[in-house]
Image (cartoon, helix red, strand yellow):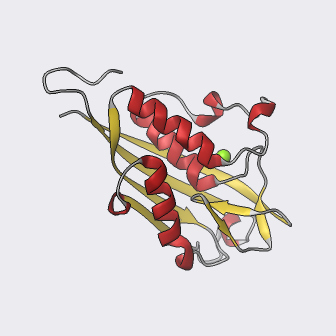
Amino acid sequence: MDIRIGNGYDVHALAPGLPMWLGGVRIPSENGFVAHSDGDVAIHALCDALLGALALGDIGHLFPDTDDTWKGVDSKILLGKVVDRVRALGWQVGNVDITIALQRPKLAPHLLAMRSTLASLLGCGTDRVSVKATTTERLGFVGRGEGCEVWATALLVGTAPDGIPAKD
Ligand code: MG
């Protein structure tokens, strides 16, 4: 069995009057993320972790913000495309772990919805998808409510038959 690990990181600025999407879930908030896409910073970090595990670059490279195809796009569509690519190369998700740093609103009531939404997109059980949230104790740009920061880790497991290395 072959395994690969990847990490992803993303930041988006907050601005009033925009919808807030995180982990594929609409979060009730006065502020949302400034972005070319829907600004789902958690999905973006997760995509980069999946791509990083296979050394496939990053989502900025795959879905450039200079391309109007991706303007306002639902980030769940981007994740779906990344997962299709991961699967086509002979890999499946072992587990993922995501940490979201946001001062407010509190995300605890939404974590389970994020886990199940992401698990269905990743084609794995909810037990393999961890989403954690923290504030930064009012320190830094996150603490001042200027933006959101997300770290993601993804472990992939090769699905090629024994004796044949998974394609890369
Ligand atoms: Mg992003």
> Vertical placement of 115 versus 134: above or below?
above
Going 38% across and 62% down the picture, which residue do you hit?
126
In the image, taking residue 128 as reference, residue 110 lies left or right, namely right
90 to the left or right of 99: left
- As drawn, the residue found furthest toward the right would be 17
Query: Where in the figure is residue 115, as x and y percent of width and height?
Result: 46, 63
Query: In front: 34, or 67?
Result: 67
Compare residues 64 and 141 and report the one nearer the observer: 64
Residue 105 rendering spot, x and y as whole percentages: 67, 77
Which of the 4 quarters of the picture holds residue 6?
top left
Looking at the image, residue 58 lies above or below residue 93:
above
Residue drawn where x is 74% and y is 74% of the image: 29
Residue 45: give x, y in percent of width and height: 55, 48
- Residue 88, above or below 152: above
Residue located 67% across and 60% down the image: 21
Image location (x, y in percent) of residue 74? 68, 48
Quadrant of the image containing the N terminus: top left
Is residue 152 rendered to the left or right of residue 127? right
Q: Is residue 73 above or below residue 162?
A: below
